[in-house]
Amino acid sequence: MTHLPDPGPYRHAAVRVAVAVLALVAALLPRSQPVSATVSAPTSVRAVAAGSVVSLPGPTGRHQVGTVSLHLVDGTRHDPWVPSHPLRELMVQLWYPAARSAGFPRARYIPALAGRLLDAQTAQALATSVPTGTFHGLRTHSYQDAPVARSAKAGRPVILLSPGDGMDRSSLTSVAEDLASHGFLVAGIDHTHDSGQVEFPGGRVEVAQNIPPGSADEETLVRTADVRFVLDQLTRLNTGANPDADHQRLPAFRNTLDLARTGMFGHSHGAEATAETMLQDRRITAGAELDGGVSDRVAAAGLHSPFMVISGNSAAGHPLTEENLTTLWPRLTGWGRWLRLRDSGHLSFTDFEIFAPELNTPPNTRQQLFGTLDPQRAVAIERTYLLAFFTWQLDHHHQRLLDRPSNRYPEMIFER
């Protein structure tokens, strides 16, 4: 029997459905399987590794994009979801402006063995046929291990990202690559045993666990602790240290990050983790949510740094995942903006918005999860508004797009 993750604080009936299917790995592995697995890809999977039936939109900025993944180990924490794991381990992917791309391969969308699992899970979640190798073979617009482009300023602004329940850092690749192409360094976090499948060096894949009902608040706090640890490791990286647990050779990041200009965004539960991290750690100087709410703590305390929310609409027109936002809003002391993307669904804020039509997802499933907004248009709007927010709040260039509704983007409603 497969188990879907608990919908946590998302109480609206439509949200329960969306969040359940959203965890594309929700059907990850039978409960009887081990928590970690060393998976070998069969010949049929290897044969299609060079191509894929899905694709990602290209970045819109002037920079080429490099990427590298880090294996990080927090020696101060046990794994909260698997007691037999003595230490908290994470995989973190960096996207950054690259000095050059010649001689460097296009990066995989998701590591090979985790991609094999994602193929099967997506087929079940989207109720469609997913050819073997779809994600195993998908290449991105980033170049693996490309050298870091130096900035004329002291360093580049940093943006952390936290994916939705049961999803992986890869689910927000199109947004991460776009931000990196405009000069930001983006760090995407796989929250191990919360994310669907996390592949570690050596072929070990840690899969999502059945987080107990009622543990949504604990899940938020765990994610926040993960983010704060990653921030510590980025500080080390910027000094020239190598925080990778396996001491892999890395591009030169010394003095390339401006950690005084650090923002964060997340989708769904990653959105809630964004607000929670802003409350706990003032190093996050600006935060954006993609279709998510906030914890009771955040709603009561308020937020003091710039904060933007982009909410979605279900196919029936009901609001999604807006827990505590109306309570929070009067308690914002910094700049705030609450937007709503018309005719969108909960998964419109992920790469699966683009993948679903390419995978011939049934119309009813598509409407329930993605709404009726054209996928290319949805992604373009989301990228535009996120870029405007971080350009204004981290790069300090005022963006009139966020002052008032735009005739160019009538799909974006200004709630507050």
Image (tube, helix red, strand yellow):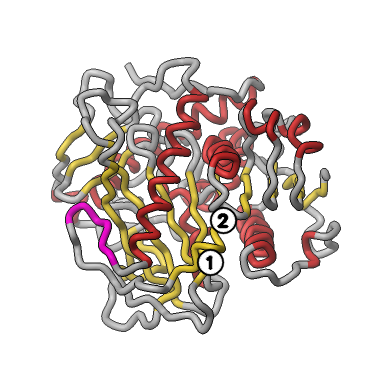
Report the span colored magenta. Answer: 241-246
Decide which of 45, 328 is in the foreground and name it. Answer: 328
* Residue 385 percent coordinates (x, y): 68, 59
Q: Image height check: is 331 above or below 181? A: above
Quarter of the figure with the C terminus: top right
Residues at marks 2 and 1 touching, judged by CB atoms closer than 8 Å: yes
Residue topped by disc 1 = 157
Magenta segment main secondary structure: loop
Res 268 → quadrant: top right
Q: Image height check: is 149 above or below 39? A: below
Residue topped by disc 2 = 263
Q: Is residue 356 left or right of residue 94?
A: right
Q: Is residue 236 visible?
A: yes
Res 366 → quadrant: top right
The answer to if 242 sits in the magenta stretch is: yes
Going from the N terminus, do you reach mark 2 or mark 1 first?
1
Q: Residue at x 33, y 30 (%)?
A: 28
* Residue 27 percent coordinates (x, y): 36, 28
Decide which of 40, 47 is in the foreground and name it. Answer: 40
Amino acid type, label 2: Gly
> Is the residue marked by circle 2 packed among few (<14), some (14-19), or many (20+) residues within 10 Å?
many
Amino acid type, label 1: Pro
* Residue 393 percent coordinates (x, y): 67, 62
Q: Residue at x 50, y 32 (%)?
A: 220
